[in-house]
Amino acid sequence: MRIHERRSLWRRMRPYFTVFDVPLTLIIIMLLTVSTITLYSASIGIPGKIEDHFRNIVLFFFVMWLVANITPQMMMRIAVPAYAIGVFLLVCVALVGTIKLGARRWLHIGVTDIQPSELMKIVTPLMLAWFFQSRAGHLTWHSYLIAALLLMVPVGLIVRQPDLGTALLVVAAGFCVIFLAGLAWKALVGLFLAGAAALPVIWSVLHDYQRERVMTLIDPTTDPLGKGFHIIQSTIAVGSGGVTGKGWTHGTQAHLEFIPERTTDFIFAVYSEEFGLIGNLILMVLYLMLIGRGLMIAGNAPNFFTRLMAGAVTMIYFTYAFVNMGMVSGILPVVGVPLPFMSYGGTALLTLGLGAGILMSIQRHRKLVQT
């Protein structure tokens, strides 16, 4: 009787433990394996990093499993309150947030600090996808204007912190939703021209350190021991890896502490130095597989909301990887964007877990969602 009861219990619980999309899960496991190997080398001499990373990975899989069990219909119901809470927390950050490294980005809650802007990378496209789903079949230019305002509210609060990197990711995810919702090409051209015309205004409102980052990108040798140090040292590390790399734990730039933030934003420089061009190609193939799987899930999504959300999450992964690799390689300004599934950091990995869970939920419930 007890064996029969256990089997019956397993049959009832099994659907909750078979929610993972196998191809997506395998890709993520491979990326996290590469991350752990690289982080071990990058964190030599920094106690506690690997232990914290394993804890973050466990939390990541728990969050991914939890979100994968939430139906897309439930996501639609929580979109508006989640957005309202996110904006409220951003306002709280602006008023009473904790200042670290000259930026007010964190909010102290109980025994820890949270960074609400990280969650807005998921919450903002969720809100926009709900908005367009609610107006499906009745979209006008007013709809896109309202969507742009919904996007600009959190972006404006994040830029004010200041946190240009996170703001860029929120804009990319939100704009992807607006574009996939049917924004006309003429409007895109108009936005591009308007953005180009507004560059002098944008330049005038940038913080001094943000202008310095752009100028440093153009010529980092103007201040090699100051503003240009990050870019110069990271590009040296990337180039010195050659074809096959210097070998695991044998990167001189990293272990002689020439690479700043080597466990977070600049972990790609550590990886490139130790594993070389071959390692970089393998890593890029893994990211292409990740993005390709996300696009496949978006293409098979059953309705407007799920297509928009899957496309937005995939765009978040692409933007993370493209901006970080470009930043470390010296072709983009340094904006503080981590490398997805590679960089150390609990909040960023939590956000990635939310995104992966959303993709798995859409894939799992695609036959249950009404189109």
Image (spheres, helix red, strand yellow):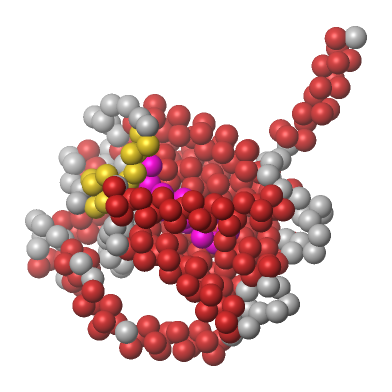
Picture residue at 38% right of the left edge, 46% below the top: 115
Check the image and name the residue furthest to the top: 1
Q: Nearer the viewer, residue 8 or 249?
A: 8
Q: Is residue 331 visible?
A: yes
Q: Which residues are magenta?
A: 114-126
| Apparent side of residue 71 relative to residue 9 in the rendered image (left or right) | left
Q: Position of residue 26 (x, y in %)?
A: 61, 42
Magenta stretch: residue 362 in it?
no
The answer to which quarter of the image holds residue 131 is: bottom right
Q: Is residue 272 visible?
A: no
Tally the marks. Answer: 0
Magenta stretch: residue 125 in it?
yes
The answer to which quarter of the image holds residue 166 is: bottom left
Q: Position of residue 359 (x, y in %)?
A: 64, 52
Q: Nearer the viewer, residue 371 or 37?
A: 371
Does 113 sit above or below residue 200? above
Does 42 sit above or below residue 360? above
Picture residue at 43% right of the left edge, 53% below the top: 88
Picture residue at 49% right of the left edge, 51% below the top: 85
The answer to which quarter of the image holds residue 113 is: top left
| Apparent side of residue 131 relative to residue 258 in the rendered image (left or right) | right
Image quarter where the N terminus lies is top right
- Is most of the magenta stretch helix, strand or loop? helix
Image quarter where the C terminus lies is bottom right
